[in-house]
Structures are given as structure tokens and as C-alpha cells.
Image (cartoon, rainbow, N blue to C red):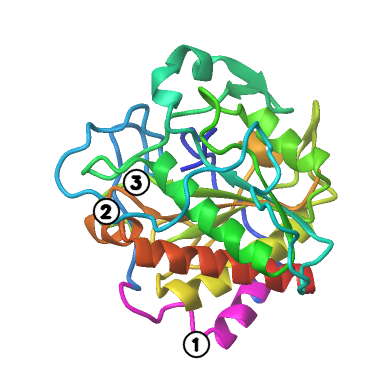
Amino acid sequence: MPYDDSPPPTRRARPLSVAAALAAVCLTAAGCGGGPEADGAGAAPPGPGAGAASSTAPTPTGKQPEPSGTASPSDSGAGADSGSAKPLPKGPLTGRTVVIDPGHNPRNRDHTREINEKVDIGTGRKECDTTGTSTDDGYAEARFTLDVSHRLRTLLEAEGARVRLTHDADRPFGPCIDERARIGNEAKADAVVSVHADGSAVGNRGFHVILPAGVKGGGADTSKIVNSSADLGARIAGHFVRTTGSAPSNYIGGNTGLDTRNDLGGLNLSTVPKVFVECGNMRDPKDAALLTSASWRQKAAQGLADGITSYLKG
């Protein structure tokens, strides 16, 4: 769920070129509806509307997710460079910089006053961050996003990319949405991907990629990144289908897996190509079973990596 999420605005039509790009990728990926658990959507926490942010996560009970199989966080400081101690291998992404933005922070729930402070998103003001959602068994979205982000970092580094995280659970809360955007901008990233999971109603299943709308006002101007971000998002959506077997969302985006929004500070303030990816719905039992599976999270990271690589290779 986007960290600066609120009841979504009226959905805006996407440019035809974006839908066409997704269709082309899906054709090569054996179709957008195929694969196990491909009828997808998800379940929602209390609050207005599908996809509304959960202010608090349930106390962990019942079955917990499988071990991540990844090392503990190694970055230090907001926007820290990759934790790699060795030189990166030469590969197709050598010379490219990717910023991964793990949605939320596991400790946000202990700093509600700070994360409720509003910041400027160019076209208005919104809360610094939110706690994110969780599964009914208490697996927090912030834990999910960090795990997938670590896996994604490893895959991209193997292709030669220089990878930065906006945070690695190494700070008491946040970073705030404006700082998350600034980290990508200052890194002059070739691509930024913000990793999330949604919190919608039971029966709502599947993933969707959120694209920046054309926004200009205050400190926000997305005019230079709308088309490139749409290309990035379409490629990620197509590869995510093929690699995970999950279908595009059945409740957002008209079964395309793509949605355009103008109310997310992380997108509004970005000056480099950026998208959010809602990997599934934590509140739907079937989607939750995927999101809590370490093997599926590896597939999710691979789908993201393949989409990013496809975009950067052109």
C-alpha cells in the first residue's frame, strides 16, 4: 500500500501507448490471465474504500511467514548505497543506478506522531508516512517490502547495477514521502521502484503498478517523467505476470495491472522515472498465502528485476 496513500481520487485514463506496451509485453509472457492463482485481488483493513491505508497492523497471531532466506539489513543511513563489499560484476546494467524504495518502515507504528506530520507534496500536503497494512496473521507490509527489496537488490547487482535503498529499517521511522522522492532524484537514478502490498477487501486480488499522472504545481512537475515511467511500469507489469503467475488486479486498473494517480507525493516529487508496485492484497487470504511465502517473494523480486532490466536495456 502506498506510504502516502489516502482514499484514491477518481481514476484517470492511461495513455493508449501504456496499454499497448503492456499488451505487447503480456503477449510475450503467455498472456496476462495465466498462471496459478491468476484470478487475483485482496482484502481490506477498516477504512473508506478499497486500497485505503491501514493505520495500525494487527498483533501477530497464527501462522507466520517462511524465513526470508536473505541476510539482515546491511545498508546504513537513508538512501544508503548497496551493502555489497565486493566490486559489482560487469553486466547489462553496468553504469546504471536503480533506487529501491521499500514502502513504510517496521517502526513507523511506534512513531505515529512523527509520521502524521504533514509534508509538502507539491500540490498540497500529506502525512509524512503511514504504518502500512498487514495480513490477518500479523505479517506487516513493512516487513514484506524490505524482504522483497533485499532480494531485488541482489538480482540487480548481479546484472551490474548500482543499487540504493531509501531505507533499510535503520532509522526510527520514515523516511517521509518527500525525502524518499529526493533520494531518487539526488541519485540521478535511471529507475526508481517503490515496493508495496495493498490492503483492500477480501476477494480483491492481484497486483497493480501505479504510474505518475501529469502533475505541475508547487515543487511538483512530472512532465518529463510521465512517458518514461509509463514504459517502466508496463514492462514491470508484463514480467510480473509471467514470473509470479499472479494476474493483474481485479479491482484497480481495469485488469491491465496499471493505474495512474496524481495524489502520491513519492511520484509527484520525482524527477526521475518512478513507479509504485502493489504486489498483491495482504487482506485477501489467497493473496496473503502468496505474500507470506518466501519462494513467491523471490518470484516477485525476479519479476520486478526482469521488468527493470527490460526497461533499462530499452
Q: Image point 61% across, 40% down: which residue?
A: 75
Asked if residue 24 lies in the magenta stretch, the reply is yes
Rendering coords of residue 209 (x, y %): 55, 57
Quick check: is 146 in the magenta stretch? no
Q: Please provide the residue range marked out in magenta.
A: 21-37
How far across and how far down the image is residue 314, in percent?
79, 74
- Give 32 or 166, whichever is nearer the viewer: 166
- On the image, the x and y values in percent for residue 6 come to 48, 33
From the top left corner, tell me how far across and down residue 3 is, in percent.
Answer: 52, 35
Q: Which amino acid lies under the numbered mark 2 shown in the image of this protein?
A: Asp
Disc sitting over residue 200 in the figure: 3
Q: Is residue 104 left or right of residue 94?
A: left
Q: Is residue 306 above or below residue 122?
A: below
Left or right position of 225 against 204: right
Q: Secondary structure at mark 3?
A: loop
Q: CA distance from mark 2 to mark 3?
A: 8 Å
Which label was assigned to residue 30? Answer: 1
For the residues marked 3 and 1, what is the alpha-carbon distance in whole angstroms? Answer: 28 Å
First in sequence: mark 2 vs mark 3: 3
Q: Nearer the viewer, residue 88 or 313?
A: 88
Between 301 and 21, the one lying in front of the other is: 301
Q: Residues within 10 Å of mark 2 (few under 14, many from 20)?
A: many
The local crowd at label 1, few if under 14, some if 14 to 19, many if 20 or more residues have their Cα within 10 Å, is few
User: In this figure, which residue is indicated by the disc labeled 2?
Assistant: 284
Q: Residues within 10 Å of mark 3 (few under 14, many from 20)?
A: many
- Marks 3 and 2: in contact by CB < 8 Å? yes
Left or right side of 137 for 38? right
